[in-house]
Image (spheres, rainbow, N blue to C red):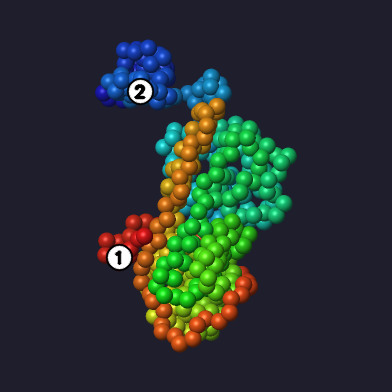
Amino acid sequence: MTRGTARSGNTAAPRSVDVARLAGVSQKTVSRVFNDEQYVSADVRRRVLEAVEELGYRRNNAARALASGRTRSIGVVTLGTALYGPASLLMGVERVVRDTGYALRVVNTMEGDAAGVTGAVSSLLDQGVDGIVISEPIDEAGAEGDASFRIDVPVLVLGAPLPVTAPRALIAGGGADLMAHSAIEHLLDLGHLTVHHLAGPQRWYAARDRLEGWRATLTAHGRTVPPVVEGDWSAASGYRAGRELAEDSDVTAVFVANDDMAIGLIRALAEAGRRVPEDVSVVGFDDIPVAAYVSPPLTTVRQPFDAVAQEGLKRLVHAIENPNADPLATSDPPIDLVIRASTAPPPSRTTPVPGRHIASRSLGGADHPPLPSGDPSTHR
């Protein structure tokens, strides 16, 4: 069929009754095809879709909203940042929402605005969204769990505690502690006696989770827990941390909370004459696009942004369309440690790393296409 041939001489917009007439089915059947309901044969579905194509029919979403009480739109609250992690997660959400047939409405918040989340959610509710995704990675003091602010639509929260009260709340995108665990296990398996940590800013939930995974793994193995150095996600803060850590000859392995800081740290170690990985092994987190091409190529934990978005949105849409049904079951996020050339066994030493203690200091002053065919990365 050729689009528009059935409309020759008629300028009126086609209606669903026109689609039904051309396809030789009832309007109810057309509606079933549009709503992707079961018990519609493949032949009938094909005829309806061909009629839609020929007529150039567009569904009237406003009328559908009035009839169903839903706007078929999902709102997203996200931090306004170009950092790799939040930006990649938002792109994953956008791809999945588009595939579900829902419209997407995004409201950005700003770091430091304690009322940002509640204000953004209020704006989306005023627009009549059917569900809300909250991808807010920062703990804004005083903004968590505001019991006076309730949401009456399903809410999906990615990688953080629930910041508002909602009767149908879903959580996805956790497990950063387990991903950090895989990085520490890798370094300990190589023979390192302990692992230092360059953490992200502790207002970020992800930074806390990665630190907790690092600390818990070392503690479980009975290893020394070195002082924590805190950066701000930037390569510059990683460079400053590297200059400091390079002065400690006991440092043979560093787990870094993101790849940008890891790259800055490696630069500082090289300038100080500490070779990576011969003298110091470095593991990053995120697997940003450049991680495979720096020198040496960076061992890192790849974040499953698309998998988190896919599962989370599937559960949210199910909650929207089946308000009385039990929520869909969750699954653990995949853990993908990409092993490259920045990690190796430690240099030989004759004395053990001294005493165990925990401290912290701050160096304050974001994350993956397919790898090249010749890249020597391995995964586990």
Quarter of the image with the N terminus is top left
What x and y, as percent, mark residue 7?
34, 18
Dot 2 lies on which element? helix
**Residue closest to the eye, 249 or 34:** 249
Vertical placement of 306 versus 199: above or below?
A: above
* Residue type beneath disc 1: Asp
Q: What's the CA distance linking mark 2 and mark 1?
A: 47 Å
Relative to residue 322, is residue 149 drawn left or right? right
Q: Position of residue 196 (x, y in %)?
A: 52, 73
Left or right: 144 in relation to 91: right
The residue singled out by tag 1 in the image is 375
Q: Is residue 318 above or below residue 291?
A: above
- Using a 10 Å C-alpha cutoff, classify the residue at mark 1 as few (fewer than 14 neighbours), some (14 to 19) or many (20 or more): few
The answer to which image quadrant residue 76 occupies is: top right
Sequence-earlier tag: 2 or 1: 2
Asked whether residue 363 is in view, the answer is no
Q: Which amino acid, mark 2?
A: Val
Residue lying at 50% horizontally and 82% vertically, measured from the top left: 352
Say which residue appears at 60% left-offset and 58% top-offset: 204
- Which residue is painted at 39% across and 18% down in the image? 30
Residue labelled with disc 2 = 52
Camera sees residue 303:
yes
